[in-house]
Amino acid sequence: MIIALDSGIGGASILKEVMENSFNNEFVYFADTMNSPYGNKSKKQIYEIVKKNVDYLSSKYKIDVLIVACNTATSVCAEKFRKIYNFPIIGVEPPIKVAIDRGNKNILVIATKQTIKTNMTLKKYISQKNADVTIELLPLKKLAKIIDKNVEDLDVVIPYLKHKLKNGKYDAIVLGCTHYNFIKKQIKQLFPNAEIISCESGVARNVKRICSNLKSQNHKLEILLSKKNLSIQNFLDNYFCNDFSRN
Ligand code: DGL
C-alpha cells in the first residue's frame, strides 16, 4: 500500500503524479481535514498530529511506502519518522535546487510559516550565500486555508497573492507548499515571466525508484478525510477522476 498524507488537498497533486508514473498499486490518500491547516501550528503540535495519523494509518494498512505529501509535515516530522517506522518515508521539499540549477537569479520561495522557519533544505541554500543569486523566503500564513476553503473557485486566491507578492521581478517562484500546486495558473497570471517550480515530478521519480519491485493486481485508490468535508471530498473524487477504481 502506498499512502500519501497532507492536511487537505495539496498532497493529492503529488499522489496523482505518483499514480500516473507507477505500476499497478494500491493507494490511499489521507487528508487531515480535522486539523488543517498545519502551517501556523507549533512544531510540537504538528509532530503530534501527524504522528497520530501515521500510527492510525499503519494500524489499518500494511504500508509499503509513506509519502508525507506536505512540506510543513516533512520539515517537522520526516527525519524523526525515519527513526521510528520501519517503512520507507518519502517527504517533499521546496525544489529550490532545481530553481538554482536552471540558472535563475531572482528566486522567490513561498511556503507556510512553519516550513519557512524549519525547513533544512531552505536553510542550506540560504546559508550558501551565492552573490549571483537572490533568494527571498515568503511565508503565506493564510494561503493553504484559502485554497482548501475555495476548491470550487481557486481564483479567489488572486487578491491575496497580489497583496502578498506585490510586484516583485522574479525569474522563478518555488512552491514550498503542496497546496500551491493547485494555483499555478493563478500565480502565472500574476507573474507571466516567472518560471513556476514545483516538486511533483521529482517525488514521483523517487517513489517509482523505491517501489520498482512493488506491484499489485489492481490499481486502486481510497480517499480518507479525518473530518467530513463535502467540497474537499468532491474535489478529490473529481481530481482523481475515473481512471482508477476506488473503494
Ligand atoms: N500542503 C501543506 C504543505 O505542503 C500543508 C499546508 C497547511 O496545512 O498549512 O505545507
Image (spheres, helix red, strand yellow):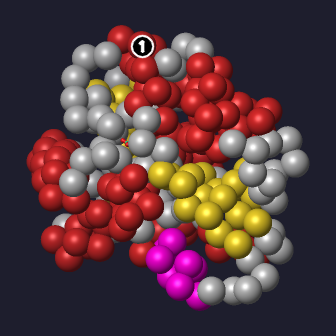
- Say which quarter of the image contains residue 205: bottom right
Q: Is residue 126 magenta?
A: yes
Residue 220 visible in this rendered orientation of the protein: no
Amino acid tagged 1: Ser
Query: Is 148 positioned to the left or the right of 159 in the image?
Result: left
Looking at the picture, tell me which residue is in the foreground, 68 or 171.
171
Q: Does the magenta stretch include residue 93?
A: no
How far from the left and from the top, in percent, is residue 99?
72, 67
* Residue beneath disc 1: 231
| Residue at the image point whose x is 22% and y is 29% from the top | 34
Check the image and report above or below for 111 versus 152. Answer: below
| Residue at the image point whose x is 44% and y is 61% from the top | 116
| Residue at the image point whose x is 79% and y is 42% from the top | 191
Q: Residues within 10 Å of mark 1 (few under 14, many from 20)?
A: some
Check the image and report above or below for 195 versus 154. Answer: below
Specify the quadrant that holds the C terminus.
top left
Instruction: Please name the predominant secondary structure of the magenta segment in the image.
Output: helix
Check the image and report above or below for 158 versus 126. Answer: above
Q: Regarding ligand 1, which quadrant of the image does it lie in?
A: top left
Looking at the picture, tell me which residue is in the foreground, 49 or 205.
49
- Label 1 lies in ligand 1 vicinity (Cβ under 8 Å): no
Residue 56 visible in this rendered orientation of the protein: yes
How far from the left and from the top, in percent, is residue 226?
22, 29
| Residue at the image point whose x is 42% and y is 42% from the top | 141
- Say which quarter of the image contains residue 16: top right
Looking at the picture, tell me which residue is in the foreground, 141 or 6.
141
Query: Is 165 positioned to the left or the right of 5 in the image?
Result: right
From which residue to which does the magenta span run? 121-128
Query: Is 81 positioned to the left or the right of 125 in the image?
Result: left
Secondary structure at numbered mark 1: helix
How far from the left and from the top, in percent, is residue 130?
69, 86
